[in-house]
Amino acid sequence: MTPHTAEKTSVTLLGLGAMGTALARTWLAAGHSLTVWNRTPVRAAALTAEGARAADSAAEAVAANTLIVVCLLDDSSVEEVLSGTGLAGKDLVNLTTSTPAQARARAEWARERGARYLDGGIMAVPPMIGVPEAGGYVFYSGSPELFERHQETLGVPAGTAYVGKDAGFAALHDVALLSAMYGMFAGAAHAFALIRKENIDPVSLAPLLVDWLVAMTPAVHQTADQLRSGDYTKGVVSDLAMQVAGTQTFLSTAEQQGVSPELLSPYFELMRRRLDEGSGEEGLTGVVDLLVR
Ligand code: FVH
């Protein structure tokens, strides 16, 4: 059994990068006994001053507690670090960003070594950790029993969202949300590029951009509803035929402003392809099907 201090689960944390250090501080502040290990030992020094115990090796850190949290750079560093440790009987929670396939393989790898496994996808940057009002949370998937057993401890650094038994689902949700974020940032980059050579203060454009993006994002619910029902014309206000006709205005404006259309063009090409399939009365949902190979 994992030892407890005042009913709080003791935690072992492997990996003290920016994220690992932020996680560690929240468990220490909440009164959890914490054993840490990092490849570069100096990163543990500040935490030992705050009450953590620094192990001399990953194997020693894993031996110290039942709950083992891993937050390393990537999946190959996880394998490297855990390979020499005794995982039998351990509750392994892997918060390292990975692909769904890597997460599923790591779950099987852990099972073969006698460990229970939960995978996590962190929807936060380090300053959001331990700050509930910042809205950060972590997707978890894998063993439901493990999630239930450790939900309280895992909820100390950030909110928790369990998304299923399939160990790959946390990574899949993580990557899906971050991919959408990059699309949004790409759009904002194009918008700023359009005004870059004009006498328009980017700081004055920023709140306009934010408000517009916030006003538009509820359309995601309509997309989801259409994907579920299969009716891509349901509730459409701005149809694809109109939107494709409008793309020329965006491309001409980019050209006139001396801005590359390379971020917009791939999306516009997909809209055109869907229109050419005879889907002019739909909105933009059909693009999803064009992407799925
Ligand atoms: N920081 C962020 O904004 C994002 C937010 C969302 C989630 N990510 C993921 O969290 C994982 C850890 O990220 P991090 O920010 O802590 O990353 P670094 O500060 O670069 O620290 C990396 C740690 O990994 C250790 N490490 C790397 N390679 C190895 C290895 N081969 N063997 C053992 N340890 C290794 C590194 O150790 P050291 O360089 O200090 O010796 C750090 O502890 C990550 O998956 C993000 O995608 C963060």
Image (spheres, rainbow, N blue to C red):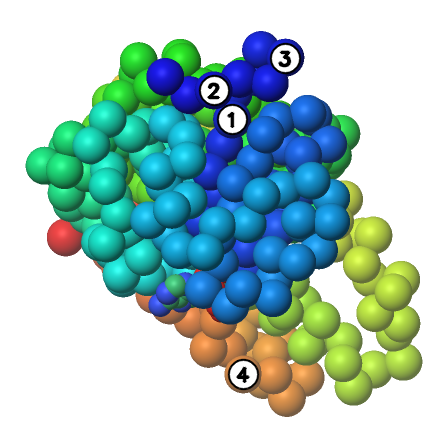
Residue density around tag 2, few if under 14, some if 14–19, many if 20 or more, within 10 Å: some
Helix, strand, or loop for circle 4? loop
User: Marks 2 and 1: CB-CB under 8 Å?
Assistant: yes
Helix, strand, or loop for circle 2? loop
Calculate the distance from the C-alpha at mark 3 to the C-alpha at mark 1.
10 Å
Toward the viewer: 274 or 214? Answer: 214
Query: Which residue position is annotated with label 1?
Result: 10
Calculate the distance from the C-alpha at mark 2 to the C-alpha at mark 1.
6 Å
Query: Which residue position is annotated with label 2?
Result: 3
Left or right of residue 280, residue 110 in this image: left
Left or right of residue 10, residue 274 in this image: left
Toward the viewer: 117 or 177? Answer: 117
N-terminal of the pair, mark 2 or mark 1, is: 2
N-terminal of the pair, mark 4 or mark 1, is: 1
Residue density around tag 4, few if under 14, some if 14–19, many if 20 or more, within 10 Å: some
Query: Which residue position is annotated with label 4?
Result: 260
Of badges 4 and 3, nearer the viewer stands 3
Label number found at residue 6: 3
Q: Amino acid at mark 3?
A: Ala
User: Marks 3 and 1: CB-CB under 8 Å?
Assistant: no
Q: Amino acid at mark 1?
A: Ser
